[in-house]
Image: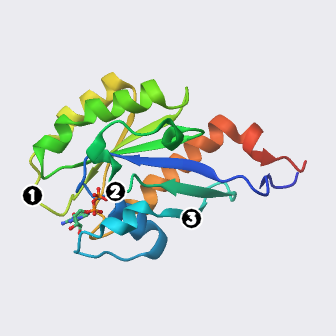
Amino acid sequence: SGTAQQKKDTKVKIVLLGDSGVGKSSIALFLCHGRFSDKHQVTIGAAFLHHTIQLKNGESMKLHIWDTGGQEKFRSLAPLYYRDAYGAIVVYDSNNVETFNSLKYWINEIKSNGPRNCYIMVVANKKDLPQKLNAEMVMKFCQQENVSFIECSAKTGENINTLFEKIASRIYSRYKDILFYNNQ
Ligand code: GDP
């Protein structure tokens, strides 16, 4: 048996959603460059970052990470933003209750405008700061919405790789037949 290889030009598109300031760019930046900046760098938000994730089964997956680039201020994003997304990371700031209140909006946004069967993961960022939301309550909410949940910190890097590995492996199980060659 051979290993499956991702089709040459397939990049698995992942979109980042959530209120401004929750740490979307910081999460992407830490994943791709392994560093954190305290400055709010709005320009980074416009970037599309690429990152290859090593899956536990030995495969690798090329992720194409889309950030809103501040468009969240206009709330409704262009359909182009969601098009062909395999996964959506919906971020809130666990130190800021208001950003959790927006979660339902962002989840509905991807569920109604995104591709059907898009894998949705809620991410509670800023785990290094005092927590203003009860994680159990949030978990219950995520179960009701049928989405995954993970806590992380883009400052310390805690769980950043783990959350992308989780997304990649879930997408792998769902879509391996269309994303990979099978060299059996
Ligand atoms: P975005 O608007 O959602 O892309 O948010 P940014 O990535 O620009 O982050 C907004 C602010 O929060 C910046 O000042 C970041 O340095 C800070 N920030 C992001 N992630 C974390 C984190 O995990 N912990 C802490 N303490 N600050 C963070």
Indicate if the residue with disc 2 has its beta carbon within 8 Å of ligand 1: yes
Residue assigned mark 1 = 130
Q: Are marks 3 and 2 in contact (CB under 8 Å)?
A: no
Give the distance between the C-alpha atoms of the residues marked 2 and 1, in whole angstroms: 19 Å
Question: Which residue does the image show at 13% across and 53% down from the upper left?
Answer: 95
Mark 1, other Cα within 10 Å: few <14 / some 14–19 / many ≥20: few
For marks 3 and 1, give the one nearer the viewer: 3
Give the distance between the C-alpha atoms of the residues marked 3 and 2, in whole angstroms: 15 Å
Indicate if the residue with disc 3 has its beta carbon within 8 Å of ligand 1: no
Q: Is residue 115 left or right of residue 181?
A: left
Numbered mark located on residue 24 in the image? 2
- Which quadrant of the view contains residue 62? bottom right
Q: Is residue 133 visible?
A: no
Question: Which residue does the image show at 27% across and 30% down from the upper left?
Answer: 104
Q: Which of 3 and 71 lies nearest the eye of the viewer?
A: 71
Q: Where residue 93 sits: x, y (%)? A: 20, 51
Q: Is residue 60 left or right of residue 102?
A: right
Question: Which residue does the image show at 70% across and 57% down from the upper left?
Answer: 59
Q: Which of 170 and 111 lies nearest the eye of the viewer?
A: 111
Instruction: Specify the amino acid type for callout 1.
Output: Pro
Q: Identify the element where label 1 is drawn.
A: loop
Q: Where residue 127 sits: x, y (%)? A: 21, 58
Residue assigned mark 3 = 51
Q: Identify the element where label 3 is drawn.
A: strand
Numbered mark located on residue 87 in the image? none
Could you tell which of marks 3 and 2 lies nearer the N-terminus?
A: 2
Give the distance between the C-alpha atoms of the residues marked 3 and 1, in whole angstroms: 30 Å
- Which quadrant of the view contains residue 51? bottom right
